[in-house]
Image: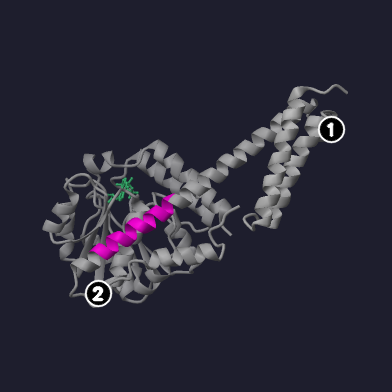
């Protein structure tokens, strides 16, 4: 088996990535399930770069033919998944922005009509959102 | 019963003043939610006698309705009506819409433009049918005009609505809530006023597709 410089670089990067995953897990910034997922992903990357035949075996099993193709398919799927998560995240951010705009609008209105006894609690929607968020309610994926 | 009409308005200076003036007779209060308009909508609505709540920036129909409903609840509304600012609804229809609610026969009402076959252009009718079908497919409740902007809720129903979409998806989301909460829905036939203006303000094909896409994602992520 011949060794190419690219393999060295990939391995070095995998080592770095795995160490980051582990240290973030230790710091408590990464939960167990995502930690295992990421570690598995990077280890698989390392294995495939060292032993490209593994990808071919995988490709045979799933029926795509060449190993490189299989790696490409997986990469594209991963990218789509990332894009989807990004979309969901942006939607969440937009909704949070709406809650702020709403709170300001209602506060403004309450301030204008002081004669009204029941001024709305303008911050209520934001508080409710924060509460749901802390219960993991809005955490998608 | 205290009746509050919520009018979401985004750059509707041509029509919002007349809409507010026509509504005053049928409501105890008219709340116009100026959704970050860059024209004179807010000032004209206020001059016409509306209570104006202004969004600092444009957040979309769903966001505007949510704000308006919150304001109406804070305003001790017993009945909350939503009414478009583009002049396509007739103020007289408000009275017919709220009648079943005030009689205690329904918790929510929707003004259906499709029950009578007049006035609605074919393209509109087709778009509406697709909206109805998608709403029914995703959320399981068929309504003959799911995208109608003319609706009414009792206070109890409005308090329980959980609306989280900011744009046009809100129309379908409201139908989902009707189903989820088991609200008794009255479908009241209304006659829309289609002017060149209200037609030109309609949502295009691309917006329709985006709305549909967001609804599907919403449904997929729903627990
Ligand atoms: N287009 C648009 N309308 C908004 C927005 N915020 C509030 N609105 C108000 O929402 C109402 C309905 O908007 P339209 O664009 O006329 O909707 P339509 O295509 O006629 O929809 P229908 O109600 O089904 O006839 C109007 O009163 C608008 O002023 C926004 O960000 N965009």
Asked which quadrant contains residue B162, the reply is: bottom left
Bounds of the magenta segment: A94-108
- Count the numbered circles shown: 2
Is residue B43 found left or right of B218 in the rendered image? left
Colouring method of the image: one colour
Looking at the image, residue B61 lies above or below residue A6: below
Q: Please give the name of the residue rendered at 65% of the width and 52% of the height, measured from the top-left corner.
A: A24
Query: Which residue is label 2 attached to?
Result: B2
Mark 1, other Cα within 10 Å: few <14 / some 14–19 / many ≥20: some
According to the image, label 1 marks what residue?
A54
Q: Quadrant of the N terminus of chain B?
A: bottom left
Expressed as whole percent of the image width and height from the top left, the position of residue A138 reads: 53, 59
Q: Which chain contains the residue that carries disc 2?
A: B
The residue under the point 73% across, 34% down is: A12
Which mark is in front, 1 or 2? Answer: 1
Q: Kindly identify which chain the residue marked by label 1 belongs to.
A: A
């Amino acid at each position: 088996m011949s060794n190419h410089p690219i393999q060295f670089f990939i391995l070095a990067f995998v080592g770095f990535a795995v160490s980051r995953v582990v240290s973030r897990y230790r710091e408590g910034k990464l939960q167990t399930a995502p930690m295992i997922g990421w570690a598995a992903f990077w280890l698989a990357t390392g294995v495939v770069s060292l032993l490209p035949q593994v990808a071919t075996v995988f490709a045979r099993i799933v029926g795509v033919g060449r190993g490189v193709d299989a790696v490409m398919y997986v990469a594209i799927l991963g990218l789509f998944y990332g894009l989807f998560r990004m979309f969901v995240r942006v939607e969440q951010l937009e909704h949070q922005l709406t809650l702020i705009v709403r709170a300001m609008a209602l506060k403004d209105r309450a301030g204008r009509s002081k004669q009204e006894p029941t001024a709305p609690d303008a911050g209520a929607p934001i508080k409710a959102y924060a509460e749901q968020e802390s219960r993991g309610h809005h955490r998608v994926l | 019963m205290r009746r509050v009409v919520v009018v979401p308005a985004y750059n509707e200076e041509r029509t919002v003043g007349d809409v507010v003036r026509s509504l005053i007779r049928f409501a105890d209060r008219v709340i116009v939610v100026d959704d970050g308009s860059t024209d004179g909508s807010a000032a004209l609505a206020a001059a016409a006698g509306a209570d104006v709540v202004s969004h600092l920036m444009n957040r979309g129909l769903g966001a505007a309705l949510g704000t308006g409903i919150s304001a109406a609840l804070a305003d001790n509304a017993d009945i909350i009506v939503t009414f478009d600012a583009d002049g396509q609804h007739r103020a007289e229809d408000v009275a017919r819409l709220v009648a079943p609610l005030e009689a205690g026969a329904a918790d929510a009402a929707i003004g259906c433009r499709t029950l009578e076959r007049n006035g609605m252009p074919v393209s509109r009718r087709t778009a509406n049918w697709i909206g109805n079908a998608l709403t029914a497919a995703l959320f399981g409740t068929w309504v003959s005009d799911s995208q109608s902007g003319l609706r009414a809720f009792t206070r109890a129903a409005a308090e329980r609505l959980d609306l989280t979409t900011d744009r046009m998806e809100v129309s379908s989301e409201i139908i989902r809530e009707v189903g989820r909460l088991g609200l008794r829905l009255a479908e009241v036939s209304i006659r829309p006023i289609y002017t060149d203006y209200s037609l030109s303000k309609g949502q295009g094909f691309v917006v329709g597709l985006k709305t549909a896409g967001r609804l599907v994602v919403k449904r997929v992520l729903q627990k």
